[in-house]
Amino acid sequence: MTAEEIRQAVLDILADIAPDEDLSQLKENVPFREQLELDSMDFLDIVMELRKRYRIQIPEEQYTELASLGSTVRYLEPRMKDL
């Protein structure tokens, strides 16, 4: 997957988890929690959806890499390049 495809996949997951949020104004390098009404369970849902949809294993100690849209795409790009 390309960076843009990964970005869209993450946005799709966010839209499913937080359907009332306006994702069109989401800033690339600002943490999700500063922009969206996400709690820790929502964050875990994002991780679980990535695992379910793309079979990506993300160790708990690396969850901080998924703080913002930009960091999430950068983290996932090498892991999803062959999908």
Image (cartoon, grey):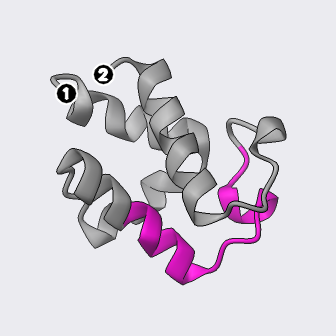
Answer whether labels 1 and 2 touch (C-beta < 8 Å).
yes
Say which quarter of the image contains residue 75: top left
Q: Secondary structure at mark 1?
A: loop
Q: Amino acid at mark 2?
A: Met
Q: Earlier in the sequence, mark 1 or mark 2?
A: 2
Which residue is painted at 33% across and 66% down in the image? Answer: 48
Q: Amino acid at mark 1?
A: Leu
Which residue is painted at 50% across and 43% down in the image? Answer: 10
Report the front residue among 75 and 1.
Answer: 1
x, y (%) of residue 53?
27, 50
Question: Which numbered marker is on residue 56?
Answer: none
Mark 1: give few (<14), some (14-19) or many (20+) Cα within 10 Å: few
What span is colored magenta in the figure?
30-47
Q: Is residue 24 above or below residue 21?
A: above
Say which quarter of the image contains residue 11: top right
Determine whether, in the image, residue 66 is placed left or right of residue 50. Answer: right
Which residue is painted at 52% across and 31% down in the image? Answer: 8
Reading the image, the residue beneath label 1 is 83
Q: Secondary structure at mark 2?
A: loop
x, y (%) of residue 50?
33, 53
Which residue is painted at 57% across and 64% down in the image? Answer: 17
Q: CA distance from mark 1 to mark 2?
A: 5 Å
Determine whether, in the image, residue 24 is placed left or right of residue 17. Answer: right
Quadrant holding the N terminus? top left
Reading the image, the residue beneath label 2 is 1
x, y (%) of residue 64?
46, 61
